[in-house]
Amino acid sequence: MSAEDLEKVNMHEAKTHLSRLVERVERGEEIVISRAGKPAAKLVPVPQAKPEKRTLGGWEGKFELPSDEEWAQMDKEIERDFEESEIFPGENKRHGKG
């Protein structure tokens, strides 16, 4: 559809009635906004993205979960990092660690 076939509104009308124009566009209309009688912009509906089909097991083989021993080691490292951090300066001294 060419700009000549579409409804045209002037800039003042577009500013004054923008919410109404957007409602019409959401219903599928296309509207041309003119400045000094010349087409300047076109309001068109935004294409809706179709949801991608998800495949069960799509991440299979892309990464490995840590073993129970590795989780335990990571927990210890996180706990140590937290306790030795400067998040709460002076706290380590109260626990006899600093």
Image (spheres, rainbow, N blue to C red):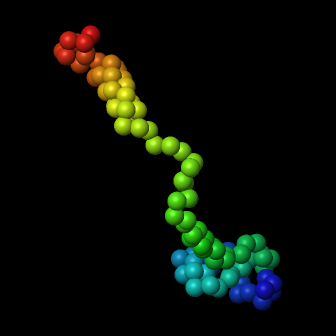
- In the picture, measured across the screen, residue 64 lies left or right of residue 47, that is left
Q: Where the C terminus falls, by quadrant?
A: top left
Residue at the spot 63% in from the left edge and 77% down from the top edge: 45
Q: Where the N terminus falls, by quadrant?
A: bottom right
- In the picture, measured across the screen, residue 15 lies left or right of residue 42, that is left
Of 29 and 78, nearer the camera is 78
- In the picture, measured across the screen, residue 79 lies left or right of residue 11, that is left
- Across and down, in percent, residue 86 comes to 34, 20
- Across and down, in percent, residue 74 comes to 39, 30
- Across and down, in percent, residue 57 comes to 52, 59
Residue 21's place in the image compared with 91, above or below, is: below
Instruction: Count all numbered tags in the image, as a single digit.
Output: 0
Q: Residue furthest bottom?
A: 5
Of 6 and 57, nearer the camera is 57
> Looking at the image, can residue 84 be seen?
yes
Of 46 and 68, nearer the camera is 68
Of 21 and 75, nearer the camera is 75
